Structures are given as structure tokens and as C-alpha cells.
């Protein structure tokens, strides 16, 4: 490694050039520029929002992420809420009067709900979250993923004629919704609280 130092007196910039050579790899030159005098200008990798929150360029603030996630969930909930009500009614019908028709109807609705839930999960996972909040967001996305897995298993079970297994998977989904709603509420994702519970707002978290 060879370390050379050059000074640019006109701009008050001290350039440190580090040359690294390794085997037959081409020389990698890393130039580090540091201000030698106070108050020199230059670009910054951070931005300040109107609320005074500073974030790295290209990384959204919590408020920005929450707004995008809530918008995704609000759109999805309009569809999943209706499907959840239909699945509940179809499940009751299939249990009270089992038949090929009721089973087929339930299977179709569960398949639709599973597809809709997968879409919202994919959209949420595609959002770029604040790095410091990944753990908190995971507390919401993890139970959502488990609930969607339960839906997929219920879909397969109904299609295969395994009603008991299907019911167990649907009950697993139901057991995950309070945790899902609570995690969403804790982070401020109020629009996501009822994405798989058929309710919205604080009512989902309280349930």
C-alpha cells in the first residue's frame, strides 16, 4: 500500500490518495477529500425534512415510509375486507351443510384472499424502510407472512378435500391477526391494522 498526499491550496482541499495493489488485480485508487479550512462548500449525503428529521439521501424517513405503507394497506384492505367477510360466511355454510358446492365456493374465496394478501405483502416488502426501524417493521411483516402462509395451506387443504386441516389453517390465520394489528399500530401503520382482520384503525389493535 502506498500513501501519497497532495494539497490543493487554491480550494483548501487536502487529497489523500490511497493506492492498493493486489496480485494481478488492477490498482484501486481511493481518493478521500477533506476540508482543510472551515466552511468549505460541497454536497451532502443527508437531507433535512420539513419536520427537521435528517435522513441519508435515498433513504425515506419514518413518516415517508408510514405514508407509503398505509396507502398500500388502505387499497388492499378494501379488497381483503370484503373477501374476509365472504370467507367467513362460506366457512360457516361449509361446516353447517357440507357439500361439494360449498367446498368449491370456499376454496375459490380462500384462493382469492391468498392472492390478494400475497400482493400486499410483496408491495410492502418492496418499500425501502428506514434502516434503524427494520426490526420494528419486521414485527409486523413476520406475522403477516405467517398468516398468509396459513391461507395458502388452507387453500391447498380445501382443494384436496381435507376440511379439518383447512379449518386449522384458517384458525391459525385468525390467531395471528391480533399480533399483526398490534405491531402495525405500534409503528404507526394504522392503515395496515385490519388488512387481514376485516377491521380498521384502533379497533383491530384492540381486538
Image (spheres, rainbow, N blue to C red):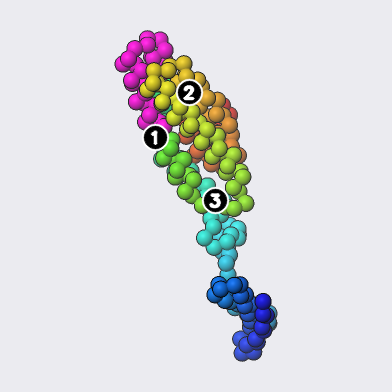
The C terminus is located in which quarter?
Answer: top right
Residue named by callout 1: 115
Is residue 33 visible in this depiction of the protein?
no
Q: Residue furthest front?
A: 23
Q: Is residue 200 above or below residue 31?
A: above
Q: Tell me the CA gap for discs 2 and 3.
A: 30 Å
Examine the structure image and report whether residue 112 is included in the region drawn in magenta: yes
Closer to the observer: label 1 or label 3?
1
Question: Which label's residue is closer to the chain start, 2 or 3?
Answer: 3
- The mark that comes first in sequence, 1 or 2, is 1
Numbered disc 3: secondary structure: loop
Of residue 62 and residue 127, the one placed in the foreground of this image is 127
Residue displayed at 62% across by 87% down: 8
In this orientation, which residue lies closer to the viewer: 93 or 108? 108
Please rate how many residues cluster around mark 3, counting C-alpha atoms within 10 Å: few if below 14, some from 14 to 19, many from 20.
some
Where disc 1 sits, the SS reads helix
Which residue is labeled 2 in the image? Answer: 170
Q: Position of residue 113 (x, y in %)?
A: 40, 31
Residue at image mark 3:
129
Q: Residue at x 39, y 14 (%)?
A: 94
Image: magenta residue range: 91-114
Of helix, strand and loop, which mostly describes the magenta segment?
helix
Q: Earlier in the sequence, mark 1 or mark 3?
A: 1
Is 71 in the magenta? no
Q: Are marks 1 and 3 in contact (CB under 8 Å)?
A: no
- Is disc 2 placed on a helix, strand or loop? helix
Describe residue 171's horizontal placement relative to residue 115 as left or right.
right
Up the image or down, 40 lies above or below 149; here it is: below
Residue extending farthest to the bottom is 10
Query: x, y (%) of residue 67?
Result: 50, 48
Amino acid at each position: 500500500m502506498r500513501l501519497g498526499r497532495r494539497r490543493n491550496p487554491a480550494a483548501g482541499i487536502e487529497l489523500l490518495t490511497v493506492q492498493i495493489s493486489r496480485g494481478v488485480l488492477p490498482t484501486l485508487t481511493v481518493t478521500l477529500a477533506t476540508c482543510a479550512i472551515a466552511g468549505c462548500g460541497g454536497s451532502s449525503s443527508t437531507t433535512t425534512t420539513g419536520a427537521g428529521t435528517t435522513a441519508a439521501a435515498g433513504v425515506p424517513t419514518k413518516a415517508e415510509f408510514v405514508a407509503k405503507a398505509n396507502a398500500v394497506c388502505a387499497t388492499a384492505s378494501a379488497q381483503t375486507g370484503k373477501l374476509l367477510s365472504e370467507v367467513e360466511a362460506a366457512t360457516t355454510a361449509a361446516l353447517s351443510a357440507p357439500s361439494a358446492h360449498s367446498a368449491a365456493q370456499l376454496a375459490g374465496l380462500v384462493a382469492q384472499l391468498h392472492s390478494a394478501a400475497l400482493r400486499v405483502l410483496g408491495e410492502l416488502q418492496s418499500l425501502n424502510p428506514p434502516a434503524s426501524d427494520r426490526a420494528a417493521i419486521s414485527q409486523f411483516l413476520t406475522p403477516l407472512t405467517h398468516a398468509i402462509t396459513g391461507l395458502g395451506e388452507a387453500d391447498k387443504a380445501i382443494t384436496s378435500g381435507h376440511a379439518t386441516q383447512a379449518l386449522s389453517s384458517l384458525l391459525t390465520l385468525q390467531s395471528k391477526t391480533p399480533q399483526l394489528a398490534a405491531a402495525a399500530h405500534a409503528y404507526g401503520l394504522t392503515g395496515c391494522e385490519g388488512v387481514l382482520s376485516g377491521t380498521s384503525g384502533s379497533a383491530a389493535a384492540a381486538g
